[in-house]
């Protein structure tokens, strides 16, 4: 599943980041790395930004839904 379709407040493991080189570089600079565990903190209604929290550092980042669709995740316990 991609990050924009993921449930709130569930630990998620980043599987892959798709998109162009600039998108991948920007997400890596924001702290999104394959294998990291994150949680959706808040998803704005209607197409607003998504607030994502790193489980390891506690840092929060808001990203747009188009970018969130480029981040493939799975439940951190391995259940799709």
Image (spheres, grey):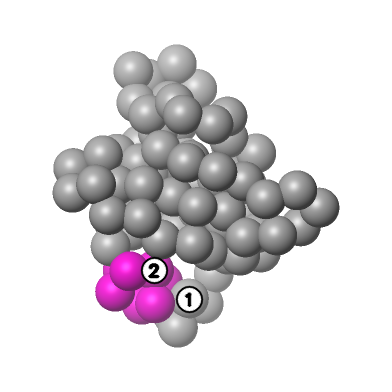
Crowd rating for badge 2 (residues with CA inside 10 Å; few <14, some 14–19, many 20+)? some
Under tag 2, what secondary structure? helix
- Quick check: can you spot residue 35? no
Q: Is residue 74 magenta?
A: no
At a point 29% along the width and 47% down the height, the residue shown is 54
Up/down of 20 relative to 49, above or below: below
- For the residues marked 2 and 1, what is the alpha-carbon distance in whole angstroms? 6 Å
Nearer to the camera, 14 or 65: 65
Up/down of 18 relative to 25, above or below: above
Instruction: From the top left corner, tell me how far across and down residue 41 is, in percent.
Output: 47, 41
Main secondary structure of the magenta stretch: helix
Query: Which numbered disc covers residue 9?
Result: none
Q: Which image quarter holds the N terminus? A: top right
The span picked out in magenta is 24-30
Toward the left, the furthest residue is 57
Nearer to the camera, 41 or 35: 41
At a point 54% along the width and 69% down the height, the residue shown is 19
| Quadrant of the image occupied by residue 2 | top right
Q: Are marks 2 and 1 in contact (CB under 8 Å)?
A: yes
Crowd rating for badge 1 (residues with CA inside 10 Å; few <14, some 14–19, many 20+)? some
- Quick check: can you spot residue 28? yes
Instruction: From the top left corner, tell me how far across and down residue 18 is, in percent.
Output: 51, 62
User: Is residue 58 rendered to the left or right of residue 7?
Assistant: left
Instruction: From the top left corner, tell me how far across and down residue 11 is, in percent.
Output: 37, 29
Instruction: From the top left corner, tell me how far across and down residue 59 is, in percent.
Output: 27, 54
At a point 62% along the width and 46% down the height, the residue shown is 43
Query: Which numbered disc covers residue 23?
Result: 1
Which residue in the structure is indicated by mark 2?
Answer: 27
User: Is residue 18 rendered to the left or right of residue 32?
Assistant: right
Under tag 1, what secondary structure? helix
């Amino acid at each position: 599943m991609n990050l924009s379709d993921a449930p709130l407040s569930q630990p998620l493991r980043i599987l892959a980041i798709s998109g162009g080189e600039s998108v991948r570089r920007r997400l890596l600079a924001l702290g999104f790395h394959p294998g990291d565990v994150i949680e959706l903190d808040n998803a704005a209604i209607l197409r607003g930004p998504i607030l994502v929290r790193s489980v390891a550092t506690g840092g929060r980042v808001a990203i747009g839904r188009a970018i969130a669709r480029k981040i493939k995740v799975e439940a951190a316990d391995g259940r799709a």
